[in-house]
Image (spheres, rainbow, N blue to C red):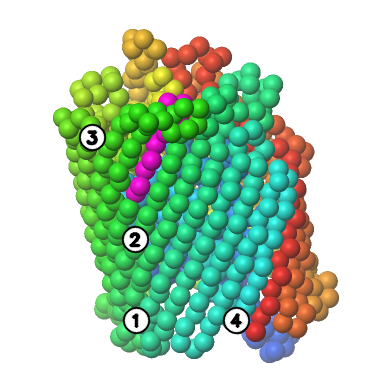
Amino acid sequence: MKTNYFLKSLLLFVVIISILLPFINSGKAISQQKDSTETGISKQDTLKKEKEKEHYETEDVVITGTRIPEKIIDIPFSVFKTDRKEMMYARNVSVKDILNDVPGIFLQSRYGSHDVRISIRGYGSRSNSGIRGIRILLDGIPETDPDGEGNIDGIDYTSLRTVEVAKGNLSSLYANAPGGVINFLSDMSFKDNFVKTTNEFGSYELRQNGLKTGLMTNNYKFFLSYNYRNFNGFREHSNEYITLVNTIFQVYPNAGTTFSVLGNFADGIIKLPGALTRSEYENNPNGAYATAVSSDFKRDLFRGRMAFRYNTFFGKNNNSNEIEITAYGKAYNLQYTTNQLYTFSDKNTYGMFLKYVNKSEILSTKNQFSTGMDFAYSYTPVSSYNNLNGIKGDELQAQNLEKLKNFGIYVQDQIYIYKDKSAFFFAARYDNMVYENDNMLYGLQNSQRNFNRITPKFALNYKLNPLIALYTSFGYAFDTPAAAELENYPYSSNNGLTTLNPDLNPQKSRNYELGIKGNFSVEEIELEKAYFEATFFNINIDDEIVPFVINDKTYFRNAASTQRTGIETGIKIEMFEGMEIQTNYTFADFKYQDYDAVTYTAGGDTINENYSGNVIPSVPKNLVNFILNYEFKINRNVTGFVLADMDYVGSMFVDDKNSESVADYYYANFLVGANMFFDNFNLLLSGGMNNIFDKKYVGFININANPELPQESRRYFEPGEPRSYYLGLNLGYSF
């Protein structure tokens, strides 16, 4: 059966490639040149074309994928960079607004802009809060904690220039990154001093107001963004109020050196409506779980981060060697509530990473070598009191001190062979993770867990021509439990006598992928240019970490072995200048291979069940995105923009037992905008509608909810956003 899954997916991949190849073969790679005397094109037009081509090539650069700046075509992984013009006009309230159309990414939103589940190749799908298995960075600084749990509460989407996504196993370069890396990049691309106000209004009393400024001289560059967001949400008890500040100051002591100070702050309150039963979802999808209202489920947060980075280039052409030293400190003060507890968590994290890169030639062959070290430490006092209808009580229920420490060291080398057409890539990383959890009330419950492993990866990249490449890779991944997932439960092997679960271990996987990507043009149909990518992957996981629930509280366990086989495809075509059509398709065949599960009743009795062969919940088998955008000149000073997109999401199971599923759905959005320039002033107007047809769908699945309750009482469902509108007005001045 395992072989059949693999062969069916591989056959589908071959079919997709066979469809693409005729266009590639009949077309011309964008980088290929024609002599002007043969084509009749003037030298001036040729130079213009070459300039446009150069811009297109240099735009496709990703830092995240290999920890070395490199063109997409030279990276032996699946990588993607978001379109800046779409972000200029988009709503930018949630990460879903800017990443939903990235091929291979599946996002589920619980409510508002927070607790969006990000899943790549199934990694991240187990999380009911926070982000797992995917490394989250903001300007290269980790937003992921040492234990691998990521959080995006502090990211201001209005301050971004682009987002880089490296998909697939990157455990050989980053800790806890079997699903990939997402790097949010602030807008440091400005060429003039500027000040800009950003304003947005929309459904459910959305109000977002901000101020951005950028200042620069030959010796420094400064960026500051302030944003305030008030959003009542489309469900009862789902409102949020948050203030965000993002700033970067860069100093250039000489041509090859940069010193940067990066700051990021967030302060706000987020109310949580909770999941619904099937009948509640059908009858009143905008309602909230009654206990979430009576107990005032919420997150009251303040977080701040400061980072210092020193980066220098030296050697041949001042570019053959690079050294980077980065140090950072983060404070995350959080108050959150459950039906019983009012909890205070004060997490302080300190970290640093070092990187050295050498670009040289070995026997007349290009070679890129890098090595680096990452270290992170967090110290978190946690105190829980009784929750009296959303108000902190005086009875101390628990008091713990959590400590996390992660040390990692990596090496990688990429050597170019056969006239630079082919490149062999090797990387390996060693990680050591230490968890400590001291119970300050009952010292005998103190416990410690330690995990360590080496994860190597091998990859090969081969260019069919300068802008089309085949790639393949094989590597191992190592994904440790988050600290919250290690919480012990009453029926573990030591009956809950320690603070940390003695039975939960990291999940380990073997990852294989094969893909093709590139740019091409087809003159016969006057196709301007196209970017495409198709990737086949096969992942075998041992000890997969999955959630389960006892008395409305989520714990985690290992589920033996899992196989994930799938295909990610995406193509973006510029039919004529300004008109782009993009379509993405993701196929996922994810199943448990060997899973003997234990379910606990409300009284603590056990029920043994076999879930082998079941489909992994909360992952659609088929996912389709279709995007059409057109940017056009209205006159010399005004540019218009129109975008329409449609997403189809296949049906999904809600639990490991596959006892119930949610229906497939599709929804459509559109936005329009105008960007106007008058001397030094800039006015950008935008507006849009999400979920045009007002489709009712499940936007987030609460996996394995309440197995001790009857099926009709289990809270699996959180509804997706109904039809909504928004308007934006940004006014800028350059000087």
For badge 2, the amino acid type reads Gly
For badge 4, the amino acid type reads Asn
Q: Is 728 placed above or below 206 here?
A: below
283 within the magenta span? no
What count of labels does the image hold?
Answer: 4
Query: Disc 3 designates what residue?
Result: 439
Q: Mark 4 to mark 3: distance in Å? A: 53 Å
Q: Is 566 placed above or below 651 here?
A: below
Label 4 vs label 3, nearer the camera: 3
Sequence-wise, which precedes: disc 3 or disc 1?
A: 1
Residue at disc 2, secondary structure: strand
Query: Disc 2 designates what residue?
Result: 329
Picture coordinates of residue 502, whole percent (x, y) = 22, 30
Query: Can residue 129 be seen here?
Result: yes
Picture coordinates of residue 15, whole percent (x, y) = 56, 45
Q: Mark 3 to mark 2: distance in Å? A: 25 Å
Q: Is residue 361 left or right of residue 275?
A: left
Q: Is 54 placed above or below 155 here?
A: below
In front here: 224 or 664?
224
Task: Please give the range of residues in magenta.
Answer: 338-347
Q: Quadrant of residue 306?
A: bottom left
Query: Disc 1 designates what residue?
Result: 313
Q: What residue do we see at 27% from left, 37% from top?
A: 400
Outermost residue on the front side: it is 394
Sequence-wise, which precedes: disc 2 or disc 1?
A: 1
Q: Mark 3 to mark 1: distance in Å? A: 48 Å
For badge 1, the amino acid type reads Phe
For badge 3, the amino acid type reads Asn
Residue at disc 3, secondary structure: strand
Query: Disc 4 designates what residue?
Result: 193
Outermost residue on the left side: it is 444
